[in-house]
Image (cartoon, helix red, strand yellow):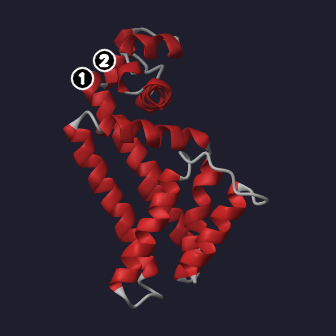
Amino acid sequence: MPPPTRTPPSKWIEVGLRGLAAGGPDAVRVEQLAQALGVTKGSFYRHFDDRGALLEGMLDTWERLTVDEVIERVERAGGDARAKLGRLFALPSIRGRQLLKIELAIRDWARRDKAVAKRLTRIDNRRMDYMRSLFGAFCADEEEVEVRCMLAFSMFIGSHFIAAEHGLRSRPDVLRLALKRLLA
């Protein structure tokens, strides 16, 4: 009978994602994670064949959190397409900065790793397809749907890199105005 598991795989993945957010994939090292969890490296190998398996599990978890669970949450609350888009656009601020840090770290990682880039493309396509289905519910013009999706997704990713001030308006106010226009 195998010994009882002290540290489930989900904990390794959680700590790995925090390391990824803080320092990229090079910061995800078995020894460092074991130390952060207060366990031995042997515990790691009960759950994962190698570091690559952990990284794959981290990407699986990130995809589930940022695509599957987001879509489920938006759909579960019901409403028309505009209401769903409003909830979708509000989620990043609700979910917190940690997921944003992970998102940005994965995007940076994808610049150097073709397999991660391929996976990121697939995930971004899933996100865009979901937005297309929502915008398409009230926009008949396919070009308009694509433009709105691109603008919305660009705001989600890019607004965190823009340092510009907005006069008397706050960043959240400007983002709300932009989203209001996208939903018109």
Q: Percent from the top left, x then y, of residue 181? A: 59, 77
Residue toward you, 58 or 180: 180
Residue 175 appearing in the image: yes
Which residue, given by chain and number where applicable, does mark 2 sit on?
45
In the picture, which quadrant includes the N terminus? Answer: top left
Residue toward you, 62 or 38: 62
Residue toward you, 175 or 3: 175
Q: Do the residues labelled 1 and 2 touch (CB within 8 Å)?
A: yes
- Residue at 43 percent of width and 31 percent of height: 13
Residue toward you, 173 or 27: 173
Q: Which amino acid does label 2 sit on?
A: Tyr
State the image quarter where residue 60 is shown. Answer: top left
Please state if 168 lies on the left or on the right of 102 as rendered.
right
On residue 49, the disc is 1
On residue 15, the disc is none
Q: Percent from the top left, x then y, of residue 160? A: 56, 47
16, above or below 151, in the image: above
- Residue at 39 percent of width and 21 percent of height: 28
Q: Percent from the top left, x then y, of residue 73? A: 54, 63
Please, which residue is most extreme toward the bottom here? Answer: 140
- Residue at 79 percent of width and 59 percent of height: 168
Please state if 110 lies on the left or on the right of 100 as rendered.
left
State the image quarter where residue 145 is shown. Answer: bottom left
Please state if 160 lies on the left or on the right of 133 as rendered.
right
SS label for mark 2: helix
Residue 71 appearing in the image: no
49, above or below 129, in the image: above
SS label for mark 1: loop
- Residue at 46 percent of width and 59 percent of height: 154
60, above or below 18, in the image: below
Mark 1 and mark 2: Cα distance apart in space: 6 Å
In the picture, which quadrant includes the C terminus? Answer: bottom right
